Every structure is written in structure tokens, then in C-alpha cells.
Image (cartoon, helix red, strand yellow):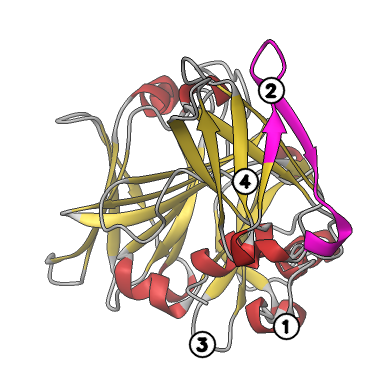
């Protein structure tokens, strides 16, 4: 099952939270006056080669290639997985990158015990908006003493040094840039708890000491994923991994008070009613003739007993949201 959070506008130039409602994965995009950062959280096991410039393991190549799985040709990024290689290394972690034709890239971190942490990609337009891209692997309910690894890239030329500060006025660690502005750091043991509960500020400087980029990660980055109950109308879509342009079904629940039923509007003005159970849950199987209708968002509205709207959400195929994220 593929889950899409529908209540956030991906194009606003303000702090943005995109909660992909998979139990062990969150994606966060941030922007701030001082700079912007992309933060990705996830985790699976594979092999690693901790040598700068070394080729990416087959499993890492497979996971980077999979960013295009189920997408139509015009939405694919086609990362150069054949030449994927280590662009930054630390004592126990490696950051691998595969580049895109437009100058962007896809990366994946492999941490201690040869654990791959999921691929994430930035297209050229992202690099213009994001002075620093940041990746932070995490595990659910990890202890304060658990390892913390931070990686990413300075998307501005001329980086010579990178400083990571834990909290306002807190201690700092220095990160050594790898290839082409990429970096990775295993947070020292005595800073792990602080890293999990403090705002993280990264500052990149050139050889003259001038600041060329800043990025900030909020203090709750390691907190639990957003609850499904935190939105008035929660929506998840059922798709097939072979074709993410299709929506086979819609499920979720309504948290807004007074909701009695749901209304879904298709193209051409057709409207269907979706019943709610006594707990506000709903389940809807999309007719075969309509499974391709969701490459444009459709409006789902929760209505009270008098037919008045109490909540609404947009419903779209996973491929639509991927396209939005990729600026397609």
C-alpha cells in the first residue's frame, strides 16, 4: 500500500512538512530565511564499502534505481546508477551518489552494520532553492545513546569547512567535505542525546571563512511520525507498485466532528458518496473505469448530516505527488 499525505502544499516557500504515512519512514522538507534543507528518514540492511570514490554496492544501486519504479517515462529521473559511488565517508558510514542529467543527484547513506537508509533525490531546481541538503537516518523509538549519522551536500560552490552546532549556543562538531560538497558525520557519543533533542544548525564556509550556506533541522526531527488523528480528514490510497499512476482504492478516517458521509468528485462532474462506519473509518474501491482519473487531484469532502462540509482533502495518484516533488 502507498500512503500520500494530501493536506500540504509542496510549493510554499515556508517551513513544510510532508508526512508519508508509512510506519517507518518520514520525509521532511524545510525552508527558512537562513537557508533550506531536505531531511529524509528511513532504514533497511545492505553491504557497504567505506572508501571515498569506491563503487556503490549492488543493493544501493538497486534502491537508487527504484526511485523511478512505477512512474511514467516523463516523471522518471533516470539516475546514473552504473557510476554510483561513495562521495563522502566517515568511520562507520558512507554516502553514495548517482547523478542526474540535469545536474541533480540521488543519494543513499549506509551506516554501521552495513545498513542502507533509503534513497532520496534532488533535481536541479531543488539545488537552486536548497543551499544545504541534509539526510538524517533514524529508527523508531531509538534510545538517546543510539548512533546518529548526518549526511548531505552543500549545494553552493567553494565549500572548505562545515560546522554542525547542537542547539542555540551549544557545542559544535566539524565536518570534512568529501567529493563535490558532499559530507557525512557520525555524531560523537557524547553529543548523541543532544543531537536527538536539539535544533541542528549547519554552517558552510569558503576558504576565506565567509558563510556560503546555512541549514537548520528542527529539534523534533527524531520525534514520532505525525499521527493520522492529527488531520481532520486522513486519506491513504491503494496502488500497484508497477504503475503508480493508478489509484485502486481509497481508505482512511474522518476526525472532524459531525461528519456523517464523504463525497468524492470525479472529472466531468460525477460525484459518488462514500459511507463512514461508526468510528469514522471508510473504504472505497475505485471502479476500473476511474483508476486513471487521479493524475489530477480529486476533491474528497466530509459532510455532516445536513450536507454541510466539515473537512476536505485532495486525493491523487502517488505518481502525481512524485511529479509535484520533482517539479514535473
Give the residue pinned by disc 4: 264
Quarter of image, res 310: top left
Q: CA distance from mark 2 to mark 1?
A: 37 Å
Give the residue pinned by disc 1: 73
Which is more foreground, mark 3 or mark 2?
Answer: 2
User: Could you tell which of marks 4 and 2 lies nearer the N-terminus?
Assistant: 4
Which residue is at a point 32% across and 35% down the rendered structure image? 218
Q: Is residue 96 among what the camera can see?
A: no
Q: Position of residue 98 (x, y in %)?
A: 64, 74
- Magenta run includes residue 289: yes
Total labels drawn: 4
Determine contact: label 4, label 3, CB under 8 Å: no
Secondary structure state at the residue bearing disc 3: loop
Up the image or down, 117 lies above or below 49; here it is: above
Left or right of 67, for residue 109: left
User: Could you tell which of marks 2 and 1 lies nearer the N-terminus?
Assistant: 1
Closer to us: 182 or 290: 290
- Badge 2 density bin: few <14, some 14–19, many ≥20, Cα 10 Å: some
Up the image or down, 90 lies above or below 261; here it is: below
Closer to us: 193 or 225: 225
Which is more foreground, mark 4 or mark 1?
Answer: 4
Left or right of 16, for residue 234: right
- Magenta run includes residue 125: no
Closer to us: 163 or 311: 311
Q: Bounds of the magenta span?
A: 273-291
Closer to us: 258 or 171: 258
Q: What label does residue 276 carry, if any? A: 2
User: Could you tell which of marks 4 and 1 lies nearer the N-terminus?
Assistant: 1
Secondary structure state at the residue bearing disc 2: loop
Secondary structure state at the residue bearing disc 1: helix
- Badge 4 density bin: few <14, some 14–19, many ≥20, Cα 10 Å: some
Quarter of image, res 60: bottom right
Amino acid at each position: 500500500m502507498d500512503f500520500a499525505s494530501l493536506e500540504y502544499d509542496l510549493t510554499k516557500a515556508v517551513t513544510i512538512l510532508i508526512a508519508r504515512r508509512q510506519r517507518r519512514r518520514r520525509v521532511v522538507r524545510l525552508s527558512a530565511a537562513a537557508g533550506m534543507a531536505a531531511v529524509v528518514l528511513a532504514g533497511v540492511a545492505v553491504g557497504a564499502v567505506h572508501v571515498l570514490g569506491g563503487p556503490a554496492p549492488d543493493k544501493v544501486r538497486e534502491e537508487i534505481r527504484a526511485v523511478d519504479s512505477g512512474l511514467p517515462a516523463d516523471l522518471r529521473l533516470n539516475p546514473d546508477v552504473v557510476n554510483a559511488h561513495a562521495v563522502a565517508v566517515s568511520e562507520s558510514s558512507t554516502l553514495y551518489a548517482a547523478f542526474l542529467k540535469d545536474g541533480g543527484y540521488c543519494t543513499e547513506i549506509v551506516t554501521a552494520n552495513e545498513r542502507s537508509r533509503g534513497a532520496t533525490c534532488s533535481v536541479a531546481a531543488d539545488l537552486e532553492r536548497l543551499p544545504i541538503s541534509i539526510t538524517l537516518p533514524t529508527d523508531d523509538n531509538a534510545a538517546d545513546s543510539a548512533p546518529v549519522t548526518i549526511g548531505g551536500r552543500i549545494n553552493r560552490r567553494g565549500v572548505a569547512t562545515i560546522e554542525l552546532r547542537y542547539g542555540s549556543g551549544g557545542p559544535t562538531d566539524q565536518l570534512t567535505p568529501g567529493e563535490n560538497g558532499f559530507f557525512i558525520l557520525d555524531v560523537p557519543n557524547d553529543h548523541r542525546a543532544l543531537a536527538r533533542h536539539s535544533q541542528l544548525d549547519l554552517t558552510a564556509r569558503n576558504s576565506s571563512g565567509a558563510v556560503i550556506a546555512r541549514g537548520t533541522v528542527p529539534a523534533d526531527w527524531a520525534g514520532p511520525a505525525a499521527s493520522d488523528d492529527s488531520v481532520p480528514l486522513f486519506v491513504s490510497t491503494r496502488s500497484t507498485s508497477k504503475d503508480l499512476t493508478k489509484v485502486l482504492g481509497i481508505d482512511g478516517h474522518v476526525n472532524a466532528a459531525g461528519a456523517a458521509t464523504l463525497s468524492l468528485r470525479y472529472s466531468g462532474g460525477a460525484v459518488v458518496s462514500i459511507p463512514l462506519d461508526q468510528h469514522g473509518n471508510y473504504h472505497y474501491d475505485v471502479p476500473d473505469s476511474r483508476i486513471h482519473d487521479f493524475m489530477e487531484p480529486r476533491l474528497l469532502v466530509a459532510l455532516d448530516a445536513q450536507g454541510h462540509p466539515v473537512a476536505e482533502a485532495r486525493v491523487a495518484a502517488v505518481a502525481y505527488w512524485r511529479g509535484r516533488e520533482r517539479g514535473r
